[in-house]
Amino acid sequence: MMVKVGVVGYGTIGQRLADGVALQKDMELVGVADVAPTLAVLALKEKGMPYDFYLAMSENKEKLEKYNIPISGSLEDLIQKVDIILDATNAGVGAKNKVLYEKYGKKAIFQGGEKTSVADVFFHGYANYEKGLGKQFLKLTSCNTTGLIRSVDCLDREIGIDNVAITIIRRVADPGDYHRGLTNALKVDPVPNHQAVDLMLVMPHVKATGVLVHTPVTHGHIISVVAKPKRETTKEEVLNLFKAHPRIRVVRIEDGFLGNASLFKYARDLGNPRGDMYEIAVWEETVTIFEGSIIYAINIPQEAVVIPENIDGIRAAMEMQTERLEAVNLTNKYLKIGGNKDA
């Protein structure tokens, strides 16, 4: 079954969603929609318009024509042509767009910035795939929560996790963002952070709490995790579980992976488009067992980490695969994640 997909919002996440869907051999990217000739849209034009463009705000038509950007139709035209929409608009806009998706009886997947109430299921491909089957509206977890849940779910399925305490060192803005200002300061949020609360919504059997610190950097978040297992384990077992997970990359400080910037540079050296990395990274030297708890630190490549789970969401909502591992493994195959580099 070739599922027809549209991407609404062609920004940091939307560009990557479009590229990710285009790689899926059982999906067709019908087009992308945005409201204005942003830099991303101008780049799309300069690349030869590999994706059809739909204008979400008709009053901006002249602005697009000024740059000779071909318009394939309106947002409603795109919605009518697809089976499912990936809504990657700014927080709050997706909830407004939902009215149109409902009008045409289409399915949609919303990003982490939307309120959880916008969707039928708060979704994660590995942790609760089955709950998304056949649903009309799914909402993805945020970038931090997506990577955090990957690691906790990985351990929970084999060892069992009772509770987690997390500390998030959060990048304050994406590369190229100016609206957050130029600062030389850290900012602390109240406990619990939303990632801990969201983890419990997706994995209600695990108790979670945590601290979040905003930092004036742009490439990646770092999360420190203290997880209480339900049985005794070893560092070797934990590392082997992480190494076996396609969306987790185990790296070593000893090899030069000193922090978030090292991982971003490595992704560029690999030739990954935009310097993206779909996998979270676990530093081997941070994995330890202390007083019965598992401690580890992970890097979250915030611009790309949620792309695989979005595609998992398409598979669940459209019931393309009903079995969790079959679905995520197909996503991994087409995105060339893990052992699928030659797919």
Image (tube, rainbow, N blue to C red):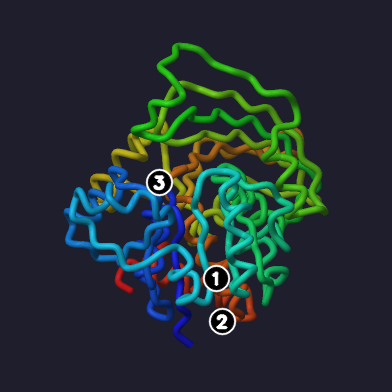
**Which residue matches tag 3?**
12
The residue located at (43%, 26%) in the rendering is 179
**Which residue matches tag 1?**
314
Chain-order first, disc 3 or disc 1: 3
Is the residue 95 above or below the residue 330 in the image?
Answer: above
The residue located at (39%, 63%) in the rendering is 20
For residue 312, what is the image quadrant? bottom right
Gap in angstroms between the C-alphas marked 3 and 2? 27 Å
Using residue 302 as the reference point, say whether residue 109 is left or right of it.
right
Question: Considering depth in this image, is 173 or 156 the residue closer to the camera?
Answer: 173
Three-letter amino acid code of the residue under disc 3: Thr
The residue located at (41%, 34%) in the rendering is 260
Give how far across and how far down residue 168 sits, in percent.
60, 31
Three-letter amino acid code of the residue under disc 2: Met
**Which residue matches tag 2?**
320
Q: Are marks 3 and 1 in contact (CB under 8 Å)?
A: no
